[in-house]
Image: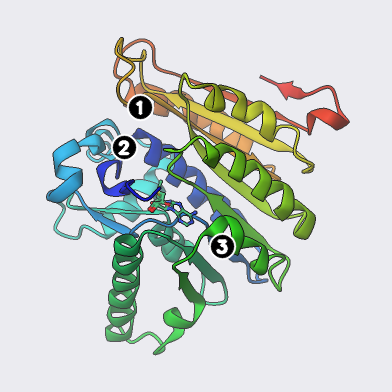
């Protein structure tokens, strides 16, 4: 189903959680010289205008990036994320918001590789266009011609079937971000099956899955299903910005489930999440959860909750 357009949701509380975690995962991979591959299975358009079109209509960014924009007391991981957004808004006005491919492009080094899947014909075209502009800009700044172009590959295809051809990456180091729309129930099943297959091909990879925390059964059962996948260990973090609306309308909570996370992620999030909850709280129902564990089949489940 291709009715989903991420522009409606750009910069909301769920994007904040997802993109802060993404940046930290890439920073960790960048600590070693060996190149890594970043695979974005559901890339979206790459960059979103906040002051026009879909984002301006929904104004969801007011639940996320807008609440952090003016603050000068952000903990380092949040400060780094907000700075990345600010760097694409040199006028100082919050006009553009970076999607996951753009965040990754900013953090990745010349030796790293970005592989981006986007199925929607309009968004994949915009994504191509955004990366063409980035390359032109880099060339104008005197960077080696084509350096960016070579390391980024955009594929307009179904990533659930396209991912397997990329695994394992040549350097055996990599991060896969899986961020589908979940507008159809089948996305939950496809994510789980794709991960099961990916772990056979690339057992040591890090896999970060975003999902909406909803009342629907597929969403409630999703983390438990991911906890059974045969990874080394996992981390599960959720952020709720308030009590759910009585009519159930709107997204108030989302989660990131990371398979084979770096050891640094849990302590970083333990420090960060209380701040983020306070900063984005809509009411006193705002909260976070953070748990880590090893696959349920091979142990007694979560170590800490
Ligand atoms: N990851 C992006 C970010 O953080 O900026 C947002 C991605 S958005 C939640 C999901 C995207 O997946 C949409 O742009 C949609 O068109 C695309 N999509 C849906 N099904 C897909 C599939 N099977 N393969 C590749 N892309 C798909």
Nearer-N-terminus badge (2/3): 2
Q: Which residue is mark 3?
A: 38
Q: Position of residue 41 (x, y in %)?
A: 52, 56
Residue extending furthest toward the bottom? 145
Q: Residues within 10 Å of mark 3 (few under 14, many from 20)?
A: many
Nearer-N-terminus badge (2/1): 2
- What SS does tag 3 mark? strand
From the viewer's perspective, is 47 left or right of 166?
Answer: left
Q: Which residue is mark 2?
A: 12
Mark closer to the observer (2, 1) = 1
Nearer-N-terminus badge (3/1): 3
From the viewer's perspective, is 157 left or right of 235?
Answer: left
Quote the CA–CA distance across marks 2 and 1.
10 Å
- What SS does tag 1 mark? loop
Q: Is mark 2 within 8 Å of ligand 1?
A: no
Residue extending furthest toward the right? 298
Q: Residues within 10 Å of mark 2 (few under 14, many from 20)?
A: many
Q: Position of residue 206 (x, y in %)?
A: 66, 51
Residue drawn where x is 34% and y is 79% of the image:
135
From the viewer's perspective, is 208 left or right of 154?
Answer: right
Q: Which residue is mark 1?
A: 251
Q: Position of residue 115 (x, y in %)?
A: 52, 68
- CB contact under 8 Å: marks 2 and 1: yes
Q: Is residue 233 visible?
A: yes
Quote the CA–CA distance across marks 2 and 3.
23 Å
Against 288, residue 143 (above or below) is below
Quarter the C terminus occupies: top right
Residue drawn where x is 39% and y is 36% of the image:
14
Q: Is mark 3 within 8 Å of ligand 1?
A: no
Q: Is residue 30 visible?
A: no
């Amino acid at each position: 189903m291709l009715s989903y357009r991420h522009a409606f949701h750009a910069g909301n509380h769920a994007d904040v959680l997802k993109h802060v975690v993404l940046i930290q995962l890439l920073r960790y991979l960048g600590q070693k010289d060996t190149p890594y591959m970043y695979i974005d299975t559901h890339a979206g358009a790459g960059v979103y205008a906040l002051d026009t079109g879909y984002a301006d209509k929904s104004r969801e960014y007011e639940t996320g990036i807008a609440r952090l924009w003016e603050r000068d007391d952000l903990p380092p991981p949040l400060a780094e994320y907000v700075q990345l957004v600010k760097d694409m808004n040199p006028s100082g006005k919050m006009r553009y918001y970076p999607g996951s491919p753009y965040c990754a492009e900013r953090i990745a080094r010349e030796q790293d590789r970005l592989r981006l899947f986007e199925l929607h014909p309009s968004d994949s075209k915009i994504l191509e266009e955004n990366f063409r502009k980035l390359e032109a800009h880099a060339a104008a700044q005197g960077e080696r011609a084509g350096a960016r172009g070579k390391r980024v590959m955009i594929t307009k295809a179904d990533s659930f079937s396209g991912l397997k051809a990329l695994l394992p990456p040549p350097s055996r180091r990599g991060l896969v971000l899986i961020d589908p729309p979940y507008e159809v129930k089948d996305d939950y099943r496809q994510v789980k099956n794709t991960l099961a297959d990916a772990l056979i091909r690339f057992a040591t990879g890090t896999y970060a899955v975003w999902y909406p925390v909803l009342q629907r059964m597929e969403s409630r059962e999703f983390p438990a299903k991911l906890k059974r996948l045969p990874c080394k260990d996992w981390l599960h973090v959720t952020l709720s910005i308030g009590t759910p609306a009585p009519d159930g309308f709107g997204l108030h909570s989302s989660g990131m489930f990371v398979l084979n996370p770096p050891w640094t992620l849990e302590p970083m999030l333990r420090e960060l999440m209380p701040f983020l909850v306070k900063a984005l709280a809509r009411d006193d129902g705002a909260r976070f959860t953070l748990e880590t564990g090893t696959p349920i089949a091979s142990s007694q489940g979560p170590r800490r909750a």
